[in-house]
Image: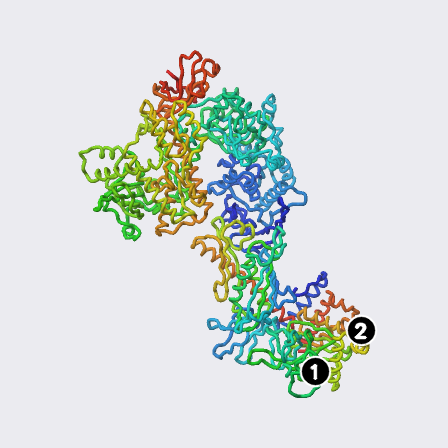
């Protein structure tokens, strides 16, 4: 199958180095302390953050830092075939863990001892790159909840098909069976907090693909920063003095 | 639009946008460049020496924000004042909270802080008003004072050495709140002021703007000396209720006139509208909104409709334009 | 730069799954005209000297690809919507179109109209995809006209009447292919134009050619929907049609649904299907199976068999019609027979051949209809139209098929190009190459750029490289056929103080020069193997590598990859090691020379001593191998002596196998096996190995029958028993045993390459060599498989990293498949080349010789001529009075005259006369007659 035409177009009309359209909205769940919707093309993810709040289960309470928990789920209607997705299957447990660890790396948990932060992410529409979208949505929601973070975490995926590194794979490209590298970075600190791939890829190509994904992360970071700045400005001027 | 899940028609949308634009215009004259997001660098003059406050950290010699908010500078101190965040207690804050647990010698309260707050039995005026050591009997009777899910008003006493937040309620004005509505809004919309208790005479309602973003709108209660007796009565009532014997007399006492209840609702809805629009909550604004709703002959439920939101936004724009002109 | 709008397309497929895809439209797609002022012209192809800019529609591409390939057609805009449609309909046309588009000499430009914000069209409600695409083409054509303005004229070419009308209504100039080509004023191009089928535009323009013939000859194909439901219900069976190479009236469809092959007899049952088509077959009622078969035989009459080279394996041999069924009419045949009811996917491409001789039509200028006969007998005759009949009659030409209507006996096609004169050696050689899909073009400059600078010699860096061992002190020599220039193997043998021998096999280190992923590597992997024709060699690698840099020539330092064993005098391997090395060959011997040295007892020089030692070891190894059950098979390879001036064959004879050949072969086998073990140990999932499947009972059936007829009992339960019984099959004459072996070889399939991850270890077995695993390591100059194995071996030693492709199982499998395909084609081409030269040889030399009967036929027998390695029919009767006075005894494999005076039985020796006759002009063939 040809995923990149010789003219350099992908199936959906993007060029290999182009991302899908990003859209983000903050404050979509009124009851939550922080919440956001993040879209990468047709992939749409909602995230809600509760906390820092009293630890529900005292035995899990940490005396020097906050407890971060994450729950990932996929809406039944998120994919083409409507299938009941029971909670706690291997995939969602794994992604929950991935998101938790990634977010924990940037939250300044020591500032909120004896408390707990709950992150709920749900995929509303799945079209490839859900993992990245979840992390981006969670970052926005955490920032919205006013939880101190050392940096924003942003994530983006990249793949390698037809001997071309492709940024931000959509579902069709993702299911082509090629490698799919998901990278999460701390843009300010210039550190990688997440690197996932479940395929074989030669080292030198991996470097290229990772580089591309990192560029993607930076683009996402710029977008997220812009959204946050706008949101903060809105809050500021609405409140008045 | 943030938090507003209403369907505006075209004109309403236009009007709302215009009003918000105006608001932006007035505030942009202020300190919009002081707004930072997470991981933004805060420009500081290192020679003067810098004290890094909340919401900042040092990274490779730079001061970097860890929150989204406004940079504030007080002498050498630089800190970021966040907007949407949980309540950050300060000693002396008047707060409204809800009892979630009755524990030995203490109540635990949910006050929108990262932990539950503690109200010790000893930091509480006893119903009989006498200052004395708390006995085991008092401890057994704690539930007669506050039960689970009671809404109470108290003052922040401070952090204990174990990091717990302690409250106190050593005045008649503090205590259980009844016959009203509790509203929760984001704490940044409540400004710390001298006065947090408000009695709106014309409607006969009480308004408590808790610093933690919990707002109480309820029937006015006279803070009198006979409060003590009142409370005894109340506790008796409750005992009666518990035993399932609701006397006619008590019913009468519990009765709140319809008109008063309507005012409570109007005031509560006004708070809802203002907070959804993200405007600072003050008594004036609430009363203004209530008046507007009555003058426009709007039903209580219509206050939550699109039109009223637009009206409130326009009113706010007007207010700010006039105040800036005054300046 | 991305200005995108997202669109939503919904498609429903099968289970009602809603598919939502994004579709980004953009404004950075350029028109490709060099003279355009708005667009970026970096990739532009369309120069301003074009009279017209042509936009073609899908059907034009699909049907007129040969026309588009002609350099006279240029300034074509290919829209992405057209490309997509072509891709879905016919991938080979798509590839050809892509090749034109990427050819920098042609002015073809691909315009991605589907992604352009102005030319994307959304399907309207109720609009079929076809209509939508037609509209998209018109919109794009319109856009081009508006975009380029008056500077050039955009012409839409379509054969769809409706589309043309709409285009003209919308103000786009449009024409049909024919009228456009006519307007170019080049009559020879018109031959390339495919005549539109009925239902297309100019039905009124094309008068029906032979109205009298308008009767239905073939059954109408069933509609696709009916086929699909039929397949689902199990009434119909799907499979690839394979036409018998030796009897084009018989075909097989391997069907998964019934797990057996369905036989299809006769053209009418084949119902217009070509070899390689995916077809839907209906099984005929059981009682008809027999009758259909006789029909096929009857039809067979007008075909005749040619003399050809003796086959060397079952893959080349004719499929055997189960003769028993023919004679004993009452037994129910085992194989179901069927009839094609529909073609699911066509496998049409172009074919090489010539025109059926026919008288010139009255006026030479007019259009003539001719019948084209393909070189490949599996392909039916093809009817073409031509304006240059006189020119083409004695030429080899290429023709491609366009359609096959059920009222016409033959498919219709069109002329593509001329190769040359029939019978001309150059032409025929090219035909051989084309027929076997062999790329004989010179290497491109990109490929040649990958070569090291010449003159090349071993550098000090090579010597200093720690992975490379300096073995120049060893007495290394090579033994090859005389005149061999691509020497890829050399040997050494040193006696060790402890009485053992150190034996080394040194193979040219090709991978030191061919890096993975370079154009050179890609080219080699495509070619797969060097092809040896009688008078030329088509190299897999460019000549400097083949003949100089890699070739382990005499007295020069060369890089090698060595396998070194320590062996006891009993030829037991004590240790094996592999290393890259530098060697210096001290002698390049030919087989004859080596043999002569060994035989000459006076010679006592060191090389000869080494040779003798090695020969002793090899004999033990060979013996051991045979004990294990390896088959000593034989093939009838022939050798030509070629005139150096004219390149015509001077003499022809059996290739003689000497002890020296066997000696070298033995060590190569051992090296291959050692390497195979090493790479499989390190890379159990991605090694490239070679296997030889055990022959099945059915395959050995004809051999057993022949053997039984002459009273020999062959035990075929295992390769060991077979080898033993072959050893015992000694007849009265010395050639008898070899003949039996030749017949046995013919029953086996060929060994094939495969990727170790695709099969289980028991399947790795190599039947012929009786080895548990085997690979190819020793000829990297001429086989790509060896190059891969070299890389694997180097990686297993930690010398190199394993190239990426080894991590991709499917790619490795496809490489193995390609190697098998190329290998097979190379063999076929060699055989065809030998056949061609045999014909040329006998043209001037009618010969009498001895031959052996290998098969009995109803009207004669097939003989094998050992001296020339050819096989062909001898007819005892003329075709007309078939079976009159001769009686065939199937059981004893005998043919007798009715009066019993003369009889011929299988394996009998007969005297025959060989002569080249020309029954028709320009169609020489070799005829065999009994004397």
- Could you tell me if residue A213 is visible in this image? yes
Residue C375, percent across and down?
46, 28
Q: Residue furthest right?
A: B248
Which image quadrant: the C terminus of chain A?
bottom right
Q: CA distance from mark 1 to mark 2?
A: 25 Å
Q: Residue furthest bottom?
A: B131
- Name the chain letter of the residue that bears numbered label 2: B
Looking at the rendered structure, the number of numbered marks drawn on it comes to 2
Residue C336, percent across and down?
54, 29
- Name the chain letter of the residue that bears numbered label 1: B
**Viewer-side residue, C205 vs A192:** A192
Q: Residue at x 68, y 69 (%)?
A: B277
The mark found on residue B173 in the picture is 1
**Viewer-side residue, B1 vs B246:** B246
Looking at the image, residue C687 sits to the left or right of residue C174; the answer is left
**Viewer-side residue, B204 vs C513:** B204
Query: What residue did someone put label 2 on?
Result: B258
Rendering quarter of residue A36: bottom right
Q: Is residue C40 above or below residue A122?
A: above
Looking at the image, residue C479 sits to the left or right of residue C28; the answer is left
Residue C784, percent across and down?
38, 41
> Which of the marked residues, 1 or 2, is nearer the chain's N terminus?
1
Does label 2 lie on the same chain as label 1? yes
Q: Residue at x 24, y 34 (%)?
A: C593
The mark found on residue C868 in the picture is none
Residue C875, percent across and down?
43, 18
- Asked which colour scheme the image uses, the reply is rainbow
Element at label 1: loop
Rendering quarter of residue C158: top right
Q: Is residue C273 above or below residue C684?
A: above
- Could you tell me if residue B30 is visible in this image? no
Label 1 crowding class (10 Å Cα cut-off): few <14, some 14-19, many 20+?
A: some
């Amino acid at each position: 199958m040809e995923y990149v035409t010789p003219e350099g177009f992908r199936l959906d009309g993007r060029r290999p180095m182009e991302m899908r359209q990003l859209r983000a909205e903050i404050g979509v769940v009124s009851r939550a302390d922080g919440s956001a919707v993040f879209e990468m093309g047709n992939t749409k993810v909602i995230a809600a953050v509760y906390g820092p709040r009293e630890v529900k289960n005292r035995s899990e309470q940490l005396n020097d830092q906050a407890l971060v928990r994450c729950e990932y789920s996929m809406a039944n209607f998120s994919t083409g075939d409507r299938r009941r997705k029971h909670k706690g299957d291997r995939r969602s447990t794994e992604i929950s863990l991935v998101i938790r660890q990634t977010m924990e790396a940037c939250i300044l948990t020591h500032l909120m001892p004896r408390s707990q932060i709950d992150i709920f992410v749900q995929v509303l529409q799945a079209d490839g790159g859900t993992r990245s979208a979840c992390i981006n949505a969670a970052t926005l929601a955490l920032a919205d909840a006013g939880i101190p973070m050392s940096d924003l975490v942003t994530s983006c995926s990249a793949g390698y098909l037809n001997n071309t590194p492709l940024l931000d794979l959509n579902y069709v490209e993702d299911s082509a069976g090629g490698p799919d590298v998901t990278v999460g970075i701390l843009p300010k600190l210039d550190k990688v907090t997440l690197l996932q791939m479940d395929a074989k890829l030669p080292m030198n190509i991996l470097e290229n693909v990772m580089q591309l994904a990192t560029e993607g992360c930076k683009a996402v970071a710029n977008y997220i920063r812009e959204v946050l700045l706008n949101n903060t400005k809105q809050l500021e001027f609405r409140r008045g003095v | 639009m943030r938090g507003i899940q209403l369907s505006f028609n075209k004109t309403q949308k236009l009007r709302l946008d215009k009003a918000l634009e105006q608001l932006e215009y007035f505030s942009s004259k202020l300190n919009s460049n002081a707004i930072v997001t997470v991981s933004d660098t805060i420009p500081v003059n290192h020679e003067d020496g810098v004290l890094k406050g909340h919401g900042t950290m040092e990274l490779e010699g730079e001061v970097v924000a860890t929150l989204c908010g406004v940079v504030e500078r007080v002498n050498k101190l630089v800190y970021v004042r966040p907007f949407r965040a949980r309540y950050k207690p300060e000693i002396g804050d008047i707060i409204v909270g809800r009892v979630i647990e009755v524990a030995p010698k203490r109540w635990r309260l949910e006050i929108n802080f990262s932990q539950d707050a503690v109200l010790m039995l000893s930091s509480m005026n006893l119903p009989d008003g006498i200052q004395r050591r708390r006995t085991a009997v008092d401890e057994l009777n704690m539930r007669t004072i506050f039960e689970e899910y009671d809404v109470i008003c108290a003052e922040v006493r401070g952090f204990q050495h174990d990091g717990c937040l302690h409250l106190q309620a050593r005045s008649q004005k503090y205590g259980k709140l009844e016959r009203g509505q509790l509203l929760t809004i984001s704490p940044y919309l409540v400004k710390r002021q001298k006065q947090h208790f408000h009695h709106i005479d014309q409607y006969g309602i009480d308004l408590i703007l808790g610093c933690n973003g919990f707002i109480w709108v309820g029937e006015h209660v006279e803070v009198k000396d006979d409060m003590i007796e009142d409370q005894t009565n109340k506790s008796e009532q409750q005992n009666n209720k518990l035993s399932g014997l609701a006397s006619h007399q008590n019913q009468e006492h519990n009765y709140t006139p319809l008109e008063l209840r309507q005012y409570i609702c109007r005031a509560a809805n006004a708070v809802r509208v203002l907070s959804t629009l993200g405007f600072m909550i003050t008594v004036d604004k609430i009363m203004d909104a209530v008046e507007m709703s009555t003058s426009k002959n709007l039903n209580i439920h219509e206050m939550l409709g699109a039109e009223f939101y637009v009206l409130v936004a326009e009113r706010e724009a007007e207010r700010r334009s006039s105040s800036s002109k005054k300046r | 730069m991305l200005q995108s709008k997202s669109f939503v397309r919904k498609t429903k497929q099968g289970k009602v799954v809603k598919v939502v895809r994004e579709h980004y439209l953009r404004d950075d797609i350029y028109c490709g005209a060099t003279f355009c002022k708005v667009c970026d012209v970096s990739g532009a192809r369309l120069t301003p000297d074009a009279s017209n800019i042509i936009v073609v529609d899908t059907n034009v591409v699909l049907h007129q690809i040969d026309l588009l390939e002609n350099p006279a057609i240029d300034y074509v805009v290919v829209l992405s919507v057209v490309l997509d449609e072509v891709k879905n309909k016919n991938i080979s046309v798509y590839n050809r179109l892509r090749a034109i588009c990427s050819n920098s000499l042609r002015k073809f430009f691909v315009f991605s109209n589907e992604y352009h914000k102005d030319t994307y069209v959304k399907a309207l409600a109720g609009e079929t995809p076809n209509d939508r695409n037609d509209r998209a083409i018109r919109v794009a054509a319109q856009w081009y006209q508006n975009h380029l303005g008056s500077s050039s004229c955009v012409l839409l070419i379509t054969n769809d009447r409706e589309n043309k009308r709409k285009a003209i209504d919308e103000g786009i100039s449009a024409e049909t292919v024919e009228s456009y080509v006519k307007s170019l004023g080049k009559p020879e191009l018109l031959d390339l134009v495919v005549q539109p089928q009925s239902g297309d535009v100019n039905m009124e323009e094309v008068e029906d050619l032979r109205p009298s013939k308008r009767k239905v000859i073939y059954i109408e194909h069933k509609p696709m929907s009916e086929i699909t439901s039929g397949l689902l219900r199990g009434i119909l069976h799907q499979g690839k049609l394979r036409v018998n190479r030796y009897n084009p009236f018989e075909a097989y469809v391997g069907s998964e649904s019934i797990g057996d092959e369905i036989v299809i007899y006769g053209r009418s049952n084949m119902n217009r299907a070509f070899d390689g088509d995916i077809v839907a077959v209906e099984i005929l009622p059981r009682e008809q199976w027999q009758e259909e078969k006789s029909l096929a035989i009857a039809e067979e009459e007008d075909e005749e068999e040619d003399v050809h080279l003796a086959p060397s394996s079952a893959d080349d041999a004719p499929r055997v019609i189960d003769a028993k069924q023919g004679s004993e009419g009452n037994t129910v045949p085992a194989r179901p027979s069927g009839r094609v009811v529909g073609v699911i996917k066509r496998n049409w491409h172009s074919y090489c051949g010539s025109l059926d001789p026919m008288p010139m039509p009255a006026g030479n200028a007019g259009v003539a209809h001719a019948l084209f006969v393909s070189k490949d007998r599996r392909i039916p005759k093809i009817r073409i139209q031509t304006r240059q009949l006189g020119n083409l009659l004695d030429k080899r030409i290429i023709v491609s098929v366009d359609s096959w209507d059920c009222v016409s006996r033959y498919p219709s096609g069109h002329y593509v190009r001329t190769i040359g004169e029939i019978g001309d050696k150059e032409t025929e050689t090219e035909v051989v190459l084309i027929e076997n899909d062999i790329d004989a073009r010179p290497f491109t400059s990109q490929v040649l750029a990958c070569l090291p600078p010449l003159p090349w010699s071993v550098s000090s860096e090579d010597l200093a490289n720690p992975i490379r061992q300096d073995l120049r002190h060893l007495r290394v020599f090579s033994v090859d056929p005389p005149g061999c220039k691509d020497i890829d193997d050399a040997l050494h043998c040193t006696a060790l103080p402890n009485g053992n021998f150190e034996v080394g096999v040194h193979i040219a280190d090709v991978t030191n020069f061919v890096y993975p992923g370079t154009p050179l590597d890609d080219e080699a992997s495509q070619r797969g193997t060097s092809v040896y024709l009688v008078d030329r060699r088509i190299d897999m690698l460019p000549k400097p590598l083949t003949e100089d840099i890699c070739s382990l020539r005499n007295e020069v330092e060369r890089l090698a990859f060595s396998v070194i064993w320590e062996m006891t005098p009993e030829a037991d391997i004590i240790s094996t090691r592999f290393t890259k090395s530098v060697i210096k060959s001290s002698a390049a011997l030919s087989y004859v020379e080596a043999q002569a040295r060994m035989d000459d007892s006076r010679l006592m020089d060191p090389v000869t001593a080494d040779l003798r030692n090695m020969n002793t070891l090899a004999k033990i190894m060979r013996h051991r191998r045979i004990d294990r059950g390896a088959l000593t098979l034989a093939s009838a390879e022939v050798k030509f002596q070629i005139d150096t001036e004219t390149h015509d064959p001077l003499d022809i004879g059996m290739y003689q196998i000497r002890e020296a050949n066997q000696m070298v072969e033995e060590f190569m086998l051992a090296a291959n096996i050692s390497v195979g073990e090493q790479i499989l140990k390190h890379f159990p999932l991605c090694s490239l190995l070679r296997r030889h499947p055990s022959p099945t009972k059915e395959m050995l059936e004809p051999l057993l029958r022949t053997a039984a007829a002459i009273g020999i009992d062959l035990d075929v339960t295992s390769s060991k028993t077979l080898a033993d019984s072959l050893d015992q099959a000694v007849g009265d004459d010395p050639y008898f045993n070899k003949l039996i072996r030749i017949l046995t070889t013919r029953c086996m399939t060929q060994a094939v390459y495969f990727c170790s991850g695709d099969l289980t270890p028991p399947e790795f077995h190599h039947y012929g060599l009786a080895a548990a695993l085997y690979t190819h390591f020793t000829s990297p100059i001429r086989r790509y498989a060896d190059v891969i194995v070299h890389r694997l071996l180097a990686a297993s030693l930690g010398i190199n990293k394993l190239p990426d492709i080894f991590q991709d199982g499917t790619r490795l499998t496809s490489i193995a498949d390609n190697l098998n395909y190329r290998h097979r084609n190379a063999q076929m081409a060699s055989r065809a080349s030998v056949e061609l030269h045999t014909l040329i040889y006998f043209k001037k030399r009618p010969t009498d010789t001895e031959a052996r009967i290998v098969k009995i036929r109803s009207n004669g027998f097939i003989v094998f001529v050992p001296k020339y390695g050819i096989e062909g029919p001898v007819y005892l009767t003329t075709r007309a009075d078939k079976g009159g006075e001769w009686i065939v005894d199937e059981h004893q494999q005998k043919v007798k005259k009715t009066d019993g005076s003369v009889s011929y039985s299988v394996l009998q020796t007969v005297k025959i006369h060989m002569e080249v006759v020309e029954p028709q002009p320009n169609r020489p063939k070799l005829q065999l007659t009994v004397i």
